Amino acid sequence: MMLLELRNLSVTRRGRPVLDKLDLSVAKGELVGLIGPNGAGKSTLMEAALGLIPFEGMSSLAAMTPNDRARQAAYLPQSREIAWPVSVEDLIALGRIPWPGGGRGTGDRQAIEAAIARMGLEPFRHRTALRLSGGEQARALIARALAQETPLLIADEPVAGLDPAQQLACLRLFRELAGEGHGLLVSIHDLGLAARFCSRLVLLAEGRVLADGNPDEVLRDKAIHRAFGITIRRIDTPDGPAILSV
Protein backbone atom coordinates (compact mmCIF):
# COMPACT_ATOMS: atom_id res chain seq x y z
CA MET A 1 0.00 0.00 0.00
CA MET A 2 1.40 3.37 -1.05
CA LEU A 3 1.48 6.04 1.66
CA LEU A 4 3.06 8.78 -0.46
CA GLU A 5 3.17 9.32 -4.21
CA LEU A 6 4.91 12.18 -5.99
CA ARG A 7 4.59 12.53 -9.76
CA ASN A 8 6.34 15.07 -12.01
CA LEU A 9 7.12 17.18 -8.94
CA SER A 10 8.91 20.41 -9.79
CA VAL A 11 9.86 23.29 -7.49
CA THR A 12 11.37 26.66 -8.33
CA ARG A 13 12.72 28.89 -5.56
CA ARG A 14 13.84 32.49 -6.05
CA GLY A 15 13.82 31.92 -9.81
CA ARG A 16 16.06 28.84 -9.57
CA PRO A 17 14.77 25.34 -10.41
CA VAL A 18 15.41 23.03 -7.43
CA LEU A 19 13.44 19.90 -8.38
CA ASP A 20 12.60 18.90 -11.93
CA LYS A 21 9.75 16.46 -12.70
CA LEU A 22 10.63 14.12 -9.88
CA ASP A 23 8.81 10.85 -9.13
CA LEU A 24 8.91 9.18 -5.73
CA SER A 25 6.76 6.81 -3.68
CA VAL A 26 6.85 5.37 -0.17
CA ALA A 27 4.97 2.21 0.77
CA LYS A 28 4.02 0.60 4.06
CA GLY A 29 6.94 -1.13 5.74
CA GLU A 30 9.61 0.92 3.95
CA LEU A 31 12.35 2.94 5.60
CA VAL A 32 13.43 5.13 2.70
CA GLY A 33 16.64 7.07 3.16
CA LEU A 34 16.85 10.29 1.13
CA ILE A 35 20.53 11.03 0.47
CA GLY A 36 22.31 13.67 -1.56
CA PRO A 37 24.67 16.64 -1.24
CA ASN A 38 23.80 19.87 0.52
CA GLY A 39 21.52 21.94 -1.66
CA ALA A 40 20.22 18.94 -3.60
CA GLY A 41 16.64 19.71 -2.57
CA LYS A 42 15.96 17.09 0.11
CA SER A 43 14.23 19.50 2.47
CA THR A 44 12.45 21.14 -0.46
CA LEU A 45 11.12 17.75 -1.58
CA MET A 46 9.67 17.04 1.88
CA GLU A 47 8.11 20.50 2.18
CA ALA A 48 6.55 20.24 -1.27
CA ALA A 49 5.26 16.72 -0.58
CA LEU A 50 3.46 18.09 2.48
CA GLY A 51 2.06 21.07 0.57
CA LEU A 52 4.05 23.57 2.63
CA ILE A 53 5.53 25.34 -0.41
CA PRO A 54 4.30 25.92 -3.98
CA PHE A 55 5.10 23.21 -6.53
CA GLU A 56 4.04 21.83 -9.88
CA GLY A 57 3.02 18.24 -10.39
CA MET A 58 1.23 15.87 -7.99
CA SER A 59 1.63 14.99 -4.32
CA SER A 60 -0.85 12.57 -2.78
CA LEU A 61 -0.37 14.27 0.60
CA ALA A 62 -0.75 17.83 -0.63
CA ALA A 63 -4.00 16.83 -2.33
CA MET A 64 -5.57 15.98 1.04
CA THR A 65 -7.37 18.36 3.39
CA PRO A 66 -5.09 19.66 6.18
CA ASN A 67 -6.79 17.47 8.77
CA ASP A 68 -6.62 14.32 6.65
CA ARG A 69 -2.99 15.06 5.86
CA ALA A 70 -2.19 15.41 9.57
CA ARG A 71 -3.71 11.97 10.16
CA GLN A 72 -1.71 10.48 7.30
CA ALA A 73 1.77 11.92 7.89
CA ALA A 74 3.78 13.22 10.84
CA TYR A 75 6.60 15.64 10.03
CA LEU A 76 9.90 16.22 11.83
CA PRO A 77 11.46 19.33 10.28
CA GLN A 78 15.18 19.98 10.30
CA SER A 79 14.73 22.85 12.75
CA ARG A 80 14.10 21.61 16.29
CA GLU A 81 13.04 24.92 17.79
CA ILE A 82 10.51 24.68 20.61
CA ALA A 83 8.80 28.04 20.86
CA TRP A 84 6.90 27.87 24.17
CA PRO A 85 7.85 26.86 27.72
CA VAL A 86 5.44 23.90 27.82
CA SER A 87 6.07 20.66 29.65
CA VAL A 88 7.42 17.67 27.74
CA GLU A 89 4.11 15.89 28.27
CA ASP A 90 2.14 18.82 26.83
CA LEU A 91 4.53 19.07 23.89
CA ILE A 92 3.96 15.40 23.05
CA ALA A 93 0.19 15.86 23.46
CA LEU A 94 0.26 18.36 20.56
CA GLY A 95 0.60 15.35 18.28
CA ARG A 96 -3.00 14.44 19.10
CA ILE A 97 -4.53 17.67 17.76
CA PRO A 98 -5.68 16.09 14.44
CA TRP A 99 -7.72 13.45 16.27
CA PRO A 100 -11.23 13.84 17.78
CA GLY A 101 -10.11 13.98 21.42
CA GLY A 102 -7.57 16.69 20.68
CA GLY A 103 -5.27 15.35 23.39
CA ARG A 104 -7.88 14.84 26.12
CA GLY A 105 -9.64 11.58 25.19
CA THR A 106 -8.84 8.10 26.45
CA GLY A 107 -7.26 7.12 23.15
CA ASP A 108 -5.17 10.29 23.25
CA ARG A 109 -3.89 9.47 26.72
CA GLN A 110 -2.87 5.98 25.63
CA ALA A 111 -1.02 7.32 22.59
CA ILE A 112 0.80 9.96 24.66
CA GLU A 113 1.83 7.47 27.35
CA ALA A 114 3.03 4.99 24.72
CA ALA A 115 5.16 7.67 23.05
CA ILE A 116 6.66 8.77 26.38
CA ALA A 117 7.53 5.18 27.25
CA ARG A 118 8.96 4.36 23.83
CA MET A 119 11.30 7.36 23.86
CA GLY A 120 12.32 6.89 27.51
CA LEU A 121 10.99 10.31 28.54
CA GLU A 122 9.25 9.39 31.80
CA PRO A 123 11.84 11.25 33.96
CA PHE A 124 11.30 14.39 31.85
CA ARG A 125 7.53 14.45 31.42
CA HIS A 126 6.98 17.42 33.77
CA ARG A 127 10.15 19.30 32.82
CA THR A 128 9.84 22.43 30.68
CA ALA A 129 10.77 21.40 27.16
CA LEU A 130 12.99 24.47 26.73
CA ARG A 131 15.22 23.15 29.54
CA LEU A 132 16.04 19.91 27.74
CA SER A 133 19.37 19.27 26.05
CA GLY A 134 19.47 19.16 22.27
CA GLY A 135 19.32 15.38 22.23
CA GLU A 136 16.47 15.30 24.73
CA GLN A 137 14.52 17.85 22.68
CA ALA A 138 14.98 15.66 19.61
CA ARG A 139 13.60 12.67 21.50
CA ALA A 140 10.62 14.72 22.70
CA LEU A 141 9.81 15.87 19.17
CA ILE A 142 10.05 12.31 17.87
CA ALA A 143 7.67 11.30 20.68
CA ARG A 144 5.25 14.01 19.54
CA ALA A 145 5.33 12.50 16.05
CA LEU A 146 4.78 9.01 17.46
CA ALA A 147 1.79 10.22 19.46
CA GLN A 148 0.27 11.48 16.20
CA GLU A 149 -0.14 7.80 15.19
CA THR A 150 0.16 8.30 11.44
CA PRO A 151 0.95 5.62 8.86
CA LEU A 152 3.75 7.80 7.41
CA LEU A 153 6.62 9.65 9.10
CA ILE A 154 8.66 12.24 7.21
CA ALA A 155 11.85 13.27 9.03
CA ASP A 156 14.39 15.83 7.82
CA GLU A 157 17.86 14.99 9.18
CA PRO A 158 16.53 13.54 12.45
CA VAL A 159 19.95 12.33 13.64
CA ALA A 160 21.86 15.56 12.88
CA GLY A 161 23.47 16.86 16.07
CA LEU A 162 22.82 13.71 18.07
CA ASP A 163 25.64 11.77 19.70
CA PRO A 164 26.47 8.33 18.23
CA ALA A 165 24.41 6.40 20.78
CA GLN A 166 21.36 8.61 20.17
CA GLN A 167 21.78 8.31 16.40
CA LEU A 168 21.74 4.52 16.64
CA ALA A 169 18.74 4.54 19.00
CA CYS A 170 16.79 6.84 16.67
CA LEU A 171 17.45 4.76 13.56
CA ARG A 172 16.73 1.51 15.39
CA LEU A 173 13.38 2.98 16.39
CA PHE A 174 12.67 3.97 12.79
CA ARG A 175 13.53 0.46 11.63
CA GLU A 176 11.16 -0.96 14.26
CA LEU A 177 8.39 1.35 13.04
CA ALA A 178 8.93 0.14 9.47
CA GLY A 179 8.76 -3.43 10.76
CA GLU A 180 5.40 -2.59 12.33
CA GLY A 181 4.06 -1.45 8.95
CA HIS A 182 4.74 2.29 9.02
CA GLY A 183 6.34 4.02 6.05
CA LEU A 184 9.22 6.43 6.67
CA LEU A 185 10.98 8.97 4.47
CA VAL A 186 14.14 10.15 6.23
CA SER A 187 16.89 12.44 4.95
CA ILE A 188 20.31 11.44 6.20
CA HIS A 189 23.89 12.51 5.47
CA ASP A 190 25.78 9.58 6.98
CA LEU A 191 26.01 7.04 4.16
CA GLY A 192 27.11 4.30 6.56
CA LEU A 193 24.03 4.70 8.74
CA ALA A 194 21.86 4.95 5.63
CA ALA A 195 23.28 1.68 4.28
CA ARG A 196 22.90 -0.06 7.63
CA PHE A 197 19.34 0.92 8.55
CA CYS A 198 17.40 1.87 5.42
CA SER A 199 15.55 -0.69 3.34
CA ARG A 200 15.78 1.60 0.31
CA LEU A 201 17.82 4.64 -0.67
CA VAL A 202 16.93 7.50 -2.99
CA LEU A 203 19.90 9.52 -4.24
CA LEU A 204 18.88 13.09 -5.07
CA ALA A 205 21.12 15.43 -7.06
CA GLU A 206 20.88 17.81 -9.99
CA GLY A 207 17.20 18.34 -9.18
CA ARG A 208 16.25 14.73 -9.84
CA VAL A 209 16.57 11.15 -8.64
CA LEU A 210 19.92 9.74 -9.76
CA ALA A 211 19.36 6.31 -8.17
CA ASP A 212 16.56 4.54 -6.33
CA GLY A 213 16.80 1.02 -4.90
CA ASN A 214 18.27 -1.04 -2.11
CA PRO A 215 21.49 0.32 -0.55
CA ASP A 216 23.74 -2.07 -2.51
CA GLU A 217 22.28 -0.79 -5.78
CA VAL A 218 22.42 2.91 -4.93
CA LEU A 219 25.79 3.11 -3.18
CA ARG A 220 27.84 2.56 -6.31
CA ASP A 221 30.89 4.58 -7.29
CA LYS A 222 29.48 6.09 -10.48
CA ALA A 223 26.30 7.53 -8.93
CA ILE A 224 27.98 8.59 -5.68
CA HIS A 225 30.84 10.29 -7.51
CA ARG A 226 28.38 12.11 -9.75
CA ALA A 227 26.37 13.35 -6.76
CA PHE A 228 29.11 14.04 -4.21
CA GLY A 229 32.37 14.08 -6.17
CA ILE A 230 33.80 11.28 -4.01
CA THR A 231 34.38 7.54 -4.16
CA ILE A 232 33.39 5.16 -1.39
CA ARG A 233 34.67 1.95 0.09
CA ARG A 234 32.33 -0.57 1.69
CA ILE A 235 33.42 -2.73 4.62
CA ASP A 236 31.05 -5.47 5.76
CA THR A 237 30.93 -6.00 9.52
CA PRO A 238 28.85 -8.29 11.78
CA ASP A 239 26.69 -5.25 12.61
CA GLY A 240 26.14 -4.17 9.03
CA PRO A 241 28.07 -2.30 6.32
CA ALA A 242 30.47 0.55 7.03
CA ILE A 243 31.00 3.15 4.31
CA LEU A 244 34.27 5.04 3.98
CA SER A 245 34.50 8.16 1.82
CA VAL A 246 37.76 8.72 -0.08
Image: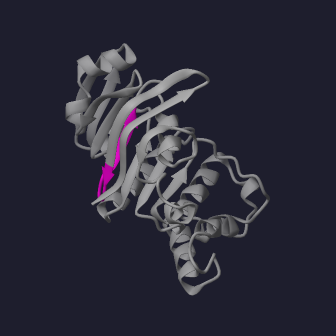
- Regarding residue 246, the answer to whether it shows in the image is no
Taking 28 as reference, is 49 left or right?
right
Residue 93, image quadrant: bottom right
Magenta segment, which residues? 26-35
On the rendered structure, is 195 left or right of 89?
Answer: left
- Indicate the colouring scheme: one colour
- Asked whether residue 29 is drawn in magenta, I would say yes
Residue 238 rendering spot, x and y as whole percentages: 22, 42
- Label tally: 0
Q: Quadrant of the C terminus?
A: top left
Magenta: main secondary structure: strand
Image x and y of residue 14, in percent: 62, 24
Could you say which quadrant of the image residue 84 lies in? bottom right
Residue 119, compared with residue 103, is above or below; it is above
| Residue 153: % across, % down | 45, 55
> What residue sits 47% from the left and 45% below the top?
49
- Which residue does the image show at 55% across and 65% down from the upper left? 67
Q: Nearer the viewer, residue 145 or 25?
A: 25
Q: At x 27% / y 46%, what residue is drawn? A: 199
* Quadrant location, the N terminus: bottom left
| Residue at the farthest bottom position | 106
Query: Does the magenta portion include 146?
Result: no
* Residue 148 visible somewhere in the drawing: yes
From the top left corner, tell me how far across and down residue 4 is, in percent: 37, 52
Q: Residue at x 39, y 18 (%)?
A: 228
